[in-house]
Amino acid sequence: AEPPAPPSRPPRMRYMLFQAKTAESIFGMIDGLVPELRLGDSTAALASLAKKAQNLTEAERRSPILDDLVSHQVDLLEEVSNQQTSEFRNRRNAEFLGSVIMDTLFTLKELRQLVPQVAELGPMLSQVASKHVRVLRPFVLVSLVLADGIFDREVLDAVASVAPGFMRRLSPAVMLQVLQVYVKARLPNPVLLETISKEAVRRIDMFSAEHTSMLVYDFATLGENNKKLMDVVGQTASRDIGLYAPEDLGRLALSYTMLGLQDLPLTNAIVTAAVWKLHMFSATSLAYLIDALSQMGHKTEKVERLIEEGSATLIKGASEMAPKLQCRL
């Protein structure tokens, strides 16, 4: 990492690299200097090239200067991964590390498909982020989690380990984006799930109906039955059931069924709302709802009637769609 003292190479070079209009001009600035570039300059050169990804010629993609630059960046990142986290605890160094991670992440996203050797940055960046995760800002941590296909479980576990320190700063929408990455990866990290459940309980009135139904569905998908969360969601959803769209009702009902829970006040509220909105349901949402209600142990007459009417609606929809499908085929 950059030492506290001013860098020996003028900061103006970094500015010039970012302002360069062509890859040719970037290569011209660093030609013969790559081994001497410090981390900030090397990162800036790669990020500037990444901004011009779609305009790079075949010759520029195969440039030996670019090969040397990527190898040099890997070496510099390895040095950072070997440093003590305490060296980045002051604000200046922490912000510098965050900017290096964000710019290198941008380079990976933009160039790894066009310049295969750029993919070599991924494993080393993963080591750096995992080692120094405790000094990274929330927006950097979220960016690491949402970097689809770039990092492995090491980064996800590292970010989850510091969830109690940054999750409270995220909006419900961003919190759900983070959670869904772990759901997709089938990683029911206990620290992350406990932190999110506590935040959701604390801020449940800030969650929209859609966010609430998605939250419990994600927990159910991971098989995570957090009693306090499910109780609070049950009470809040029962009170505000009129705000729930058909998709939310189906997702909410199925979530409780997946976890083997039966919340009668919530079920009655869902059924009442579903009866009024039956004509608005998509086939998928209605199937979710019927599936959930069908698995209930004790069914009231109202539930039985909704299952019957919903099933008839699905059958009718399928029969009306069949001739259209045959015509297309």
Image (cartoon, helix red, strand yellow):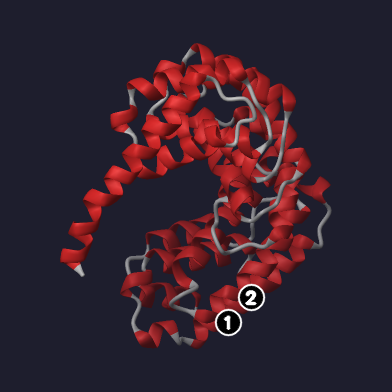
Alpha carbon of mark 2 to alpha carbon of mark 1: how far? Answer: 6 Å
Q: Are marks 2 and 1 in contact (CB under 8 Å)?
A: yes
At horizontal 52% and vertical 66% (from top left) the residue drawn is: 108
Label 2 SS: helix
> Which numbered dot is residue 315?
none
| Image coords of residue 34 (percent x, y) | 58, 77
Q: Which amino acid type is marked by label 1?
A: Asp
Q: Is residue 132 left or right of residue 141?
A: right
| Image coords of residue 260 (percent x, y) | 69, 35
Q: Is residue 124 above or below residue 292?
A: below
In terms of depth relative to the viewer, which is nearer, 241 or 3?
241
In terms of depth relative to the viewer, which is nearer, 176 or 248?
248
Q: Is residue 166 above or below residue 243?
A: below
| Image coords of residue 309 (percent x, y) | 37, 31
For disc 2, the marked residue is 72
| Image coords of residue 281 (percent x, y) | 34, 35
The image quarter in which residue 327 lies: bottom left
Can I make out residue 36 in this image? no
For disc 1, the marked residue is 68
Label 1 SS: helix
Q: Which residue is most to the left?
A: 327
In terms of depth relative to the viewer, which is nearer, 178 or 11?
178
In terms of depth relative to the viewer, which is nearer, 6 or 153?
153
Q: Which amino acid type is marked by label 2?
A: His
At horizontal 81% and vertical 58% (from top left) the residue drawn is: 83
Q: Residues within 10 Å of mark 1 (few under 14, many from 20)?
A: some
At horizontal 22% and vertical 61% (from top left) the residue drawn is: 325
The image quarter in which residue 218 lies: top right
Can I make out residue 161 in this image? yes
Q: Is residue 170 above or below residue 124?
A: above
Q: Residues within 10 Å of mark 2 (few under 14, many from 20)?
A: many
